[in-house]
């Protein structure tokens, strides 16, 4: 065999996805059983009989966890590693369309996929919520106290209806907050420890969401009576308000179980996976091909993220000899592919910031000279946004597309939204890529026996320039999107006046109004979060930019310490590759000089 066995790799990827999904369901079942066991034990304590039926509570908790399996399976099947797939090969045009893809087919497919995903998720949550709340209502018959305060067996249908409403509201919340996107931790901890630490937060979140569901259920039933003119309520032995409030405890446990499932998805899916060599007899490059293939496997974002995480761990720790395989001992080494993939998300972010700043400046020019702004925008569209392939092309289609792109070019909010999507989707990959590229550049001094890090492209000079470029881009995001810091001399009367104004009724009204506008999509950014920023559209990307900025500064600092003045020579060498994706060569040199001066002091 002269190269990697593709069938073997695809089988490994399929097994990885299957076993991780089964792990999510199993750990969700365990966590839900623990929460339900505590709930049933609390109900036994209210009986005041002096005995706690532990085994009976355990089997009831086991049955409740079984009723929540549809929600756990749905979460395991729909959890995501990022909001958008990242294509390291840049096989995308300026409009974000994959080459050879029809724009109509792309949008229609995306809408159908999203609709089917959240539709199935809503059905699973409504089914699990209705079954769980109905089962918990029957358990409230254990004592007179719980029967008087909680929904009991006679209110089973009403509790099931409440559970369905809770499920739909939870899916809406997940949809509006990207709740299916898991967060990779900075430190990998054991599953049992993370599960134990997550029990109390899940219970707290479930109690809060169940309270919101009580209010929403009352509102929905009242609106159905007033507007739709039909009775949307199951039989209940008490009034609508008290009946909904009596379902709060059951809804809290059901919602806590769903939060536990999301937590288990973030625990299991984010654990490191090692893309080990299939064979060491075909040379270093063939041995590194499983990792290189996974770095480009954007069809499954989880596999791609785990590959970047594995690359980062290999570059920093050595990976039990796997780092030496990247450098290789022949001209045909894995170094170019690995470094190209590591630097790809950094270059994408730099280009996005450059495009956003261009559009922001065009918008400022539009306010002063409309004719000049139109001429520049037309040229900008021709250079940066190629026309996509339409199924039925016509002069009207081309004219409408050009007008749309020109309006987007002159819209800083559209540019800011695109930048925020890029930072949110590729920010984690960029951090791993910066750490991996910096660590590989450092280890090249001792482990690169052939000197491929300097001979093959992208070489060390490209690494230094790309890190400095994204550093300038992230600093621009922070400067443009951060709120200004008001310098004060202490706790003065002006501070008291500002605090009083912020807490006034008018300020609260404006805050609510801005939240409504942002939720409805009328404004691209939440003005409450961008108060006083130079470019409010950049504000949502500031936290991710700060994290990436710190990571890149650490990588550049380590390079400056280890290579010394050679780093400046590398940056000077990179000028042969043309202008950087963001900033100017002088700005890159100034940023590097500032880092070296900080290290010297």
Image (tube, rainbow, N blue to C red):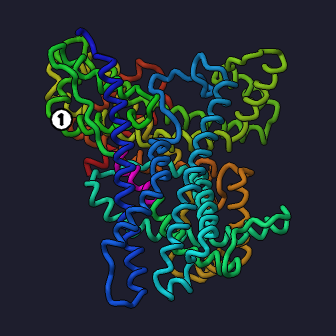
What residue span does the magenta drawing correspond to? 259-270
Q: Which residue is nearer to you in this view: 365 or 532? A: 532
Q: Where is residue 48 shown, x and y percent of the image?
A: 39, 90
Residue 279 colored magenta? no
Image coordinates for residue 533, horizontal then vertical, percent: 61, 55
> Is the residue 96 above or below the residue 394 in the image?
below
The answer to whether residue 43 shows anywhere in this view is: yes
Q: Position of residue 409 (x, y in %)?
A: 70, 33
Q: How many marks?
A: 1
Q: Is residue 572 visible?
A: no
Classified by dominant secondary structure, the portion drawn in magenta counts as helix
In the image: residue 412, left or right of residue 548: right
Label 1: which residue? 318
Left or right: 389 in relation to 315: right
Give the vertical position of 484 relative to 275 (above or below). below
Name the residue located 28 percent from the left edge and 54 percent from the top edge. Answer: 191
Q: Is residue 587 left or right of residue 246?
A: left
Look at 23% across and 40% down and name the residue there: 561
Tag 1 secondary structure: loop
Front one among 90 and 416: 90
How far from the left and from the top, in percent, is residue 112? Answer: 64, 35
Quarter of image, res 402: top right
Q: Residues within 10 Å of mark 1 (few under 14, many from 20)?
A: some
User: Is 433 above or below relative to 214?
Assistant: above
């Amino acid at each position: 065999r002269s190269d990697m066995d593709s069938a073997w790799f695809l089988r490994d990827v399929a097994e990885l996805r299957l076993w991780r999904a089964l792990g999510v369901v199993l750990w969700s079942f365990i966590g839900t059983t623990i929460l339900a066991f505590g709930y049933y034990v609390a109900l036994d304590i209210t009986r005041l009989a002096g005995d706690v039926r532990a085994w009976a509570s355990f089997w009831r908790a086991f049955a409740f966890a079984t009723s929540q399996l549809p929600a756990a399976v749905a979460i395991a099947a729909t959890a995501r590693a990022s909001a958008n797939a990242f294509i390291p090969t840049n096989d995308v045009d300026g409009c974000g369309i994959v080459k050879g893809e029809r724009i109509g087919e792309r949008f229609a497919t995306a809408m159908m996929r999203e609709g089917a995903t959240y539709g199935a998720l809503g059905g699973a949550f409504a089914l699990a919520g209705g079954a769980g709340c109905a089962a918990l209502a029957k358990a409230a018959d254990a004592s007179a106290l719980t029967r008087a305060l909680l929904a009991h067996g006679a209110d089973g249908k009403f509790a099931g209806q409440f559970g369905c409403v809770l499920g739909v509201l939870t899916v809406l919340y997940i949809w509006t907050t990207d709740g299916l996107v898991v967060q990779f931790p900075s430190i990998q901890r054991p599953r049992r420890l993370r599960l134990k630490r997550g029990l109390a937060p899940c219970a707290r979140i479930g109690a809060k969401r169940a309270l919101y569901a009580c209010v929403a259920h009352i509102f929905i039933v009242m609106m159905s009576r007033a507007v739709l003119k039909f009775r949307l309520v199951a039989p209940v032995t008490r009034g609508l308000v008290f009946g909904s409030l009596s379902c709060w405890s059951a809804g809290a446990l059901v919602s806590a179980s769903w939060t536990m499932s999301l937590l288990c998805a973030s625990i299991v899916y984010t654990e490191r996976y090692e893309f080990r060599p299939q064979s060491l007899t075909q040379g270093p490059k063939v041995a590194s091909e499983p990792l290189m293939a996974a770095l480009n496997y954007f069809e499954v974002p989880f596999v791609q993220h785990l590959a970047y995480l594995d690359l980062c761990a290999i570059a920093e720790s050595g990976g039990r000899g796997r780092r030496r395989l990247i450098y290789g001992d022949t001209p045909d080494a894995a170094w170019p592919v690995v470094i190209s993939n590591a630097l790809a998300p950094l270059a994408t972010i730099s280009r996005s910031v450059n495009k956003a700043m261009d559009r922001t400046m065009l918008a400022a020019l539009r306010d002063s000279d409309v004719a000049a702004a139109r001429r520049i925008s037309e040229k900008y569209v021709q250079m940066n946004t190629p026309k996509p392939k339409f199924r039925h092309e016509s002069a009207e289609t081309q004219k409408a597309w050009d007008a749309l792109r020109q309006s987007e070019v002159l819209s800083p909010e559209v540019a800011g939204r695109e930048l925020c999507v890029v930072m949110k989707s590729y920010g984690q990959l960029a951090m791993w890529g910066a750490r991996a590229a910096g660590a590989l550049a450092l280890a090249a001094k001792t482990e690169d026996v052939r000197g491929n890090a300097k001979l093959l492209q992208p070489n060390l000079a490209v690494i230094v320039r790309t890190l400095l470029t994204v550093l300038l881009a992230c600093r621009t995001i922070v400067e443009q999107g951060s709120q200004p810091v008001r310098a004060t001399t202490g706790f003065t009367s002006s501070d008291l006046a500002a605090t009083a104004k912020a807490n006034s009724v008018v300020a609260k009204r404006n805050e609510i109004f801005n939240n409504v506008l942002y939720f409805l999509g009328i404004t691209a950014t939440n003005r409450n979060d961008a108060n006083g920023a130079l470019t409010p559209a950049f504000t949502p990307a500031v936290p991710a930019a700060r994290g990436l900025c710190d990571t890149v500064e650490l990588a550049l600092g380590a390079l400056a310490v280890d290579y010394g003045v050679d780093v400046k020579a590398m940056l000077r060498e990179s000028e042969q590759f043309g202008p950087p994706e963001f900033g100017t060569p002088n700005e890159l040199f100034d940023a590097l000089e500032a880092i070296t001066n900080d290290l010297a002091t």
